[in-house]
Image: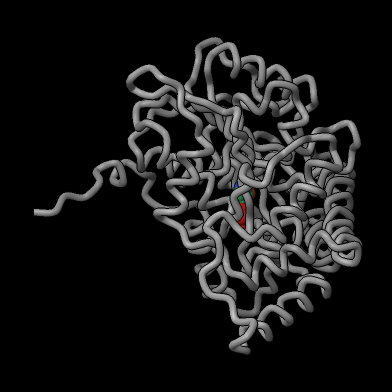
């Protein structure tokens, strides 16, 4: 008799975005003419940069000839991409990262979840609340206990250092869903906490490319001592429109060691490498050539222009909502705007109001955790026209709420 992993039965019944899709589909069925503007799911809308497209075309052509065809690549990723990552993301910021500390993958979603493969099921896991649901779901699947650390206006949406220790702590800055960033000092405090308590920090920097303020850290490895306590996840998805192409990378410093059951300390770099070699056959060659082109001079210029496009939306949305007398957070160093619902209306109720009265799809904050109640998330990943029209419509109903 086969048994299911019972932990899966503890998961929340449906995925947040499936719930939203169901409500939007029901509304659309009842109102087939409705012109719905989607500022809900965090997918990008602008096409790939021309430099990326050209590089991927060249890679396809290489694979079309027997002399240059590529089959299985290194499980850790090709050196041409790893070298570009190190030069651009780390050396340029004065951080020393070696080739065998970088693991190229098909996504930060899979890596932030799969990393649990190499961690004990007995670890207590801390997450900030509201939270990107992947951290909670994947750790629930593994049977781990979760502690929620509320992020709110009082702590600048950065979360207070918990009084009790956790074994593993997920941090994500710029944050999904709140759009908050973390200051160097606050990140330093998390690193000190981790070193003092032997806590492993899992730092999700998927949105670092949206940081505008020079004082905000892009990488946890900008903080002294972080290499001994942190893993960092990065992605080309939001930086360069790779949500469909798929390519990301994870940095596991060789200094990082955690306890084994026997009491010895083992390096997670080696263990993750072993895991990847057994379970993963590398990201596609074509994706990796596309990703390499993101770091070329042309690629950087083009990718930056797209990020600027989204950040113009973010600014427009922020300013418009503030102009209507609403309270907004985020959207300054992040593509997410975290809007406090007016008059204490519940998240899902406000989501429905915006869908039914303004035909605008958002994401209810409560879907990201208890501390998200009373907020909704709006993304800046739409078009200029869509973002402006959505704000015009919200402006026209705000007075009647
Ligand atoms: N991490 C965060 C915080 C995200 O919001 C997302 C996507 O929305 C991801 C990771 C997923 O990245 P990827 O497309 O590389 O799997």
Is 37 or 107 nearer to us in this picture? Answer: 107
Q: Is residue 357 visible?
A: no
Q: Residue at x 76, y 34 (%)?
A: 181
Point out residue 44 in the picture as x, y percentages from the top left corner: 71, 63
Point out residue 165 in the picture as x, y percentages from the top left corner: 50, 14
Is 349 or 181 nearer to us in this picture? Answer: 181
Residue 194: quadrant of the picture: top right
In this rendering, is residue 271 above or below 192? below
Which of the image's four quarters has the N terminus?
bottom left
In this rendering, is residue 370 above or below 283? above
Q: Residue at x 65, y 28 (%)?
A: 227
Is 275 or 141 nearer to us in this picture? Answer: 275
Query: In the rendered view, does 317 fall on the left or right side of 196?
Result: right
Residue 263: quadrant of the picture: top left
Q: Residue at x 63, y 36 (%)?
A: 203
In this rendering, is residue 134 above or below 286? above
Point out residue 286 in the picture as x, y percentages from the top left corner: 64, 73
The colour mode here is one colour
Residue found at the very far bottom of the displayed protein = 65
Q: Is residue 155 visible?
A: yes
Residue 327: quadrant of the picture: top right
Q: Residue at x 88, y 58 (%)?
A: 304
Residue found at the very far left of the displayed protein = 1
Query: In the rendered view, does 73 fall on the left or right side of 342?
Result: left
Point out residue 261 in the picture as x, y percentages from the top left corner: 33, 22
């Amino acid at each position: 008799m086969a048994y299911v992993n019972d932990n899966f039965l503890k998961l929340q019944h449906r995925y947040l975005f499936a719930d939203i899709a169901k409500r939007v589909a029901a509304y659309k069925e009842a109102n087939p003419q409705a012109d719905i503007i989607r500022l809900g799911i965090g997918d990008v809308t602008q096409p790939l940069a021309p430099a990326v497209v050209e590089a991927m075309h060249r890679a396809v052509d290489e694979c079309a000839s027997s002399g240059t065809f590529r089959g299985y690549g290194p499980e850790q990723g090709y050196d041409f991409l790893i070298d570009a990552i190190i030069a651009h993301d780390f050396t340029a910021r004065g951080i020393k990262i070696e080739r065998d500390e970088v693991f190229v993958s098909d996504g930060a979603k899979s890596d932030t979840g799969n990393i649990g493969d190499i961690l004990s099921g007995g670890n207590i896991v801390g997450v900030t609340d509201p939270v990107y649901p992947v951290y909670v779901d994947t750790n629930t699947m593994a049977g781990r206990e979760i502690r929620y650390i509320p992020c709110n206006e009082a702590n600048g949406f950065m979360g207070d250092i918990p009084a009790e220790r956790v074994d593993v702590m997920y941090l994500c800055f710029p944050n999904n869903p709140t759009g908050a960033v973390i200051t160097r000092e606050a990140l330093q405090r998390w690193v000190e906490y981790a070193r003092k308590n032997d806590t492993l920090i899992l730092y999700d920097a998927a949105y670092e490319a949206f940081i505008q303020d020079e004082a905000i850290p892009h990488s946890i490895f900008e903080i002294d001592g972080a290499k001994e306590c942190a893993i960092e996840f990065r992605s080309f998805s939001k930086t360069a429109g790779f949500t469909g192409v798929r390519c990301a990378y994870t940095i596991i410093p060789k200094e990082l060691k955690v306890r084994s059951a026997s009491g010895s300390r083992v390096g997670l770099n080696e263990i993750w490498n072993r895991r990847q070699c057994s379970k993963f056959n590398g990201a596609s060659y074509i994706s990796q050539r596309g990703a390499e082109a993101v770091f070329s001079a042309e690629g950087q210029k083009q990718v930056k222009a797209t990020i600027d496009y989204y950040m113009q939306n973010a600014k427009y949305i922020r300013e418009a909502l503030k102009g209507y007398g609403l309270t907004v957070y985020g959207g300054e160093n992040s593509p997410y705007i975290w809007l406090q619902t007016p008059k204490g209306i519940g998240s899902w109720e406000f989501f429905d109001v915006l869908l039914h009265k303004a035909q605008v799809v958002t994401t209810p904050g409560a879907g990201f955790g208890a501390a998200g109640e009373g907020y909704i998330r709006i993304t800046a990943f739409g078009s200029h026209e869509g973002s402006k029209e959505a704000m015009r419509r919200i402006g026209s109903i705000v007075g009647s709420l």
